[in-house]
Each structure stands twice: as structure tokens, then as C-alpha cells.
Image (spheres, rainbow, N blue to C red):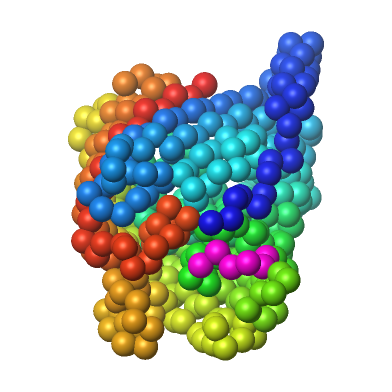
């Protein structure tokens, strides 16, 4: 297996200087300026065990502690219509994510049109991608439903592709008698450069390099007066493969697209959520070892969150992923390739419990019963034939924020 091909561009010394600069700027500002500066952060550590297969480390032989998250967020409201914000992020997730410290996002947000009921603006920089209901806040443990998001939709085995990227999004929204609306549309340079992404799209960590070229994204969201949310997301991204010397693969192309519907309804302490998507992956030009193909996939989950006491919340979810809508059970794939049919699908039933010990400290426990291996992290499970179809996973996580 190749070592991680990306190293963080942020050196520890630079981070220290940056944090001291933020602190001194905040301390030296007058009251009006200080009120326009926000600094927040979080840290979380998880423990993961599996009956078979590995998830974020060697979880099946010994409980893995290789899922660590920490972030420092800063924002400066320069003017009423101009905001600069960014986040430094440390993340380790087994062999799937070994980059450690990185710039999560950093953008300028300018609302060039606004009144009491409407606004239109633009975000430029390394921007968070508006994708579904949870993508923009997925890195903060307190804001996501569960230790893990539904893996069929918010796949952690190639999260860098939909998380954040250099580019621009124009956005807008308004308040109406029939609810509030929000829309975003933009273009970015997608991040395909990781072993985990190659495993997800190409089935292995190939000798060459997969480089993102361009991507387009759009989302429309409506929040009704009856406490319901409806959202529609579209994403399309392309990447080129640059072969290495003596590479058996040719200079190919990857095209990924997805249209996803999100529905959420809140009934007092109960929140019901479902999202359904039809991703499509097209491979072209890789040569005889990886023939041209087009895979129409299917993703779906249904989820309930019940805040049954002020500090306690119960999570129940069923999550389904099919790599091909035309071969849901994977039998055609197995007959053609000799590889396990269960690598083409995954059914995940999840039960979780959240305890907010204080406003700043949260503890979670989660159990997953999984049938299939379609979203298993490739770098943690490089031997495809050794993966087990039915497996269990449990997770514990403690998180702190300030």
C-alpha cells in the first residue's frame, strides 16, 4: 500500500503563530471589534470495535483508537455584509485519513444584496460544499446525528470529494408566507487525490494519480412553517488519471454525478429524516485492465432521533447502499469478476445513544449491524477477498467544545 500522497501544508510552527495571532488580535481589539470576532473549537476521541473487517484502524483484532477529530474555527465579521471565516482541522481515521492537520475550509462571504426578507451573496476560497442536509457541519461531532453519518450518502471512505474544495458558490434565500427558501450554485476543483477515493471509484490504490479537474454543485432547500424541510442536491465532478511509469493502466477519466432528495420533519422531541440519491460513476479510457463502465448506484436511509429527556437522545437508522441498481445483490458482478457479491451492497441498521453531560461535553455510544461491505474503507481492508459479508460494529465517543 502506498503511503499517504498528501502532507498537510500547515506546519505546526505556523499553526502556533496563527493561533497566537488570533488571540492577540482578539485581546487587543476594542469592544466593538471584539464582538465581530468569534473563535470556537472542539475535540473528540472515539473507540471502535468490529466483529469482522476493519473500520478506521485495526478494529477487529483490538479496539481501534484511530478516530480522532479536533478543530479550531475562527470568523471575523468585517462589515455587516462581509465575513471571513475558516477552520483548522486535525483528523485521523485509520488508514483512510492519515493527513492529520489540514485547512478544513477558508472563505470570504460577501452578501452583495440584502434586505429584511431576502439576501444574495457569494463565497470564495476553499468552500464547504452544500450537499444534502449534514455535509457542511459534518466535521463537528455535536452537529451530526450519530458518531457516523449514514455511510451510503456521506461516505467517509471518500469524504474529501464532497467536503470542501477551492472554488466559488453563489447563494441566496428569502422569507415568505409559505416558509423560507435557500439556494446555492457553484463550481469547484474537486479533491480526488487520496488512496481512499481511488479504492471507492477504481477498486484499488492504483500506481498513478487521480487528479480532480472541475465540478459543479447546486442545492435548493425549503423550510416550511410546519417545521418540515425539503432539499434537492445535484453534484457532478470529473477527474483525470495520470499513469505512472510502467503503469498497466492508461490515462483514463472518472465522472461522478448524483441527484439527491432530502426530507426532514420535526415533531417536538422527534426528528424524522430520509435522504435518497442515485449516484452514477462513469469510467473511460483506463485500458483492458479496467474496461469502460457506467454504474448507476442507489443510496437511501431513514432515520429517527428522539430527545426523550433534556440531556438524552436515542437514534435509530436503517441505511442502504447499492453500487448498481441493476445488480443489487451483486451476483452478476461476482459471476463476471469472481469477486465477492457483497462488495456491491451494504445494509446497515444502527442504534445510538447520546448524553449531553454538560453544554460542552457529549458522550455517545453506537451499534451497527451490517450486511455487505460496499462502503468499507479500502485502505483499512486492502484484501477484497478477505472481507466478511455480515459484521457488527460498536463505537464510543467523547467530545468537547468551547
Q: Is residue 162 visible?
A: no
State whether residue 198 is above or below residue 92. Answer: below
Residue 217 horizontal/vertical position (percent): 62, 66
Front-most of residues 239 and 75: 239
Front-most of residues 163 and 99: 99
State whether residue 79 is above or below residue 302. Answer: above
194 is within the stretch colored magenta: no
Residue 195 horizontal/vertical position (percent): 56, 58
Magenta stretch, main secondary structure class? loop
Q: Quadrant of residue 48?
A: top left
Q: Which residues are magenta?
A: 204-210
Count of numbered marks: 0
x 37%, y 55%: residue: 150
Residue 242 horizontal/vertical position (percent): 72, 72
State whether residue 49 is above or below residue 130. Answer: above
x 71%, y 69%: residue: 244
x 69%, y 74%: residue: 246
Extreme residue toward the front, this view: 246
Residue 72 left/right relative to 382: right
Residue 336 left/right relative to 93: left
x 55%, y 64%: residue: 205
Q: Quadrant of residue 186?
A: bottom right
Q: Is residue 360 visible?
A: yes
Residue 121 horizontal/vertical position (percent): 72, 52
208 is within the stretch colored magenta: yes
Amino acid at each position: 500500500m502506498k503511503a499517504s500522497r498528501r502532507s498537510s501544508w500547515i506546519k505546526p510552527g505556523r499553526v502556533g503563530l496563527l493561533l497566537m495571532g488570533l488571540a492577540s488580535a482578539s485581546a487587543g481589539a476594542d469592544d466593538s471589534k471584539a464582538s465581530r470576532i468569534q473563535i470556537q473549537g472542539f475535540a473528540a476521541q472515539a473507540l471502535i470495535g468490529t466483529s469482522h473487517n476493519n473500520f478506521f484502524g485495526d478494529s477487529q483484532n483490538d479496539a481501534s483508537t484511530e478516530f480522532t477529530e479536533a478543530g479550531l474555527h475562527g470568523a471575523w465579521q468585517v462589515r455587516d455584509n462581509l465575513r471571513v471565516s475558516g477552520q483548522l482541522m486535525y483528523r485521523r481515521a485509520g488508514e483512510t485519513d492519515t493527513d492529520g492537520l489540514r485547512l478544513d475550509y477558508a472563505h470570504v462571504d460577501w452578501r452583495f444584496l440584502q434586505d429584511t426578507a431576502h439576501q444574495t451573496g457569494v463565497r470564495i476560497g476553499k468552500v464547504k460544499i452544500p450537499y444534502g442536509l449534514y455535509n457542511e457541519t459534518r466535521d463537528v461531532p455535536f452537529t451530526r446525528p450519530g458518531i457516523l453519518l449514514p455511510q451510503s450518502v456521506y461516505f467517509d471512505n471518500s469524504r474529501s470529494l464532497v467536503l470542501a474544495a477551492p472554488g466559488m458558490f453563489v447563494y441566496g434565500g428569502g422569507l415568505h408566507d409559505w416558509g423560507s427558501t435557500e439556494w446555492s450554485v457553484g463550481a469547484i476543483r474537486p479533491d480526488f487525490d487520496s488512496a481512499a477515493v481511488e479504492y471507492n471509484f477504481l477498486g484499488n490504490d492504483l500506481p498513478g494519480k487521480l487528479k480532480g479537474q472541475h465540478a459543479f454543485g447546486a442545492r435548493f432547500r425549503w423550510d416550511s412553517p410546519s417545521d418540515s424541510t425539503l432539499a434537492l442536491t445535484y453534484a457532478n465532478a470529473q477527474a483525470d488519471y495520470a499513469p505512472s511509469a510502467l503503469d498497466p493502466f492508461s490515462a483514463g477519466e472518472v465522472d461522478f454525478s448524483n441527484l439527491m432528495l432530502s426530507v426532514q420533519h420535526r415533531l417536538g422531541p422527534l426528528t424524522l429524516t430520509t435522504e435518497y440519491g442515485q449516484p452514477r460513476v462513469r469510467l473511460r479510457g483506463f485500458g483492458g485492465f479496467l474496461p469502460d463502465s457506467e454504474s448507476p448506484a442507489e443510496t437511501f436511509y431513514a432515520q429517527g432521533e428522539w430527545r426523550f429527556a433534556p440531556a438524552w437522545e436515542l437514534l435509530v437508522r436503517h441505511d442502504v447502499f447499492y453500487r448498481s441498481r441493476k445488480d443489487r445483490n451483486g451476483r452478476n458482478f461476482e459471476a463476471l469478476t469472481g469477486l465477492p457479491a457483497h462488495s456491491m451492497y451494504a445494509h446497515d441498521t444502527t442504534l445510538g445513544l447520546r448524553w449531553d453531560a454538560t453544554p460542552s461535553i457529549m458522550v455517545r455510544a453506537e451499534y451497527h449491524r451490517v450486511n455487505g461491505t460496499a462502503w468499507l474503507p479500502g485502505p483499512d481492508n486492502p484484501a477484497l477477498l478477505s472481507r466478511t459479508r455480515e459484521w457488527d460494529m460498536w463505537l464510543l465517543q467523547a467530545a468537547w467544545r468551547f
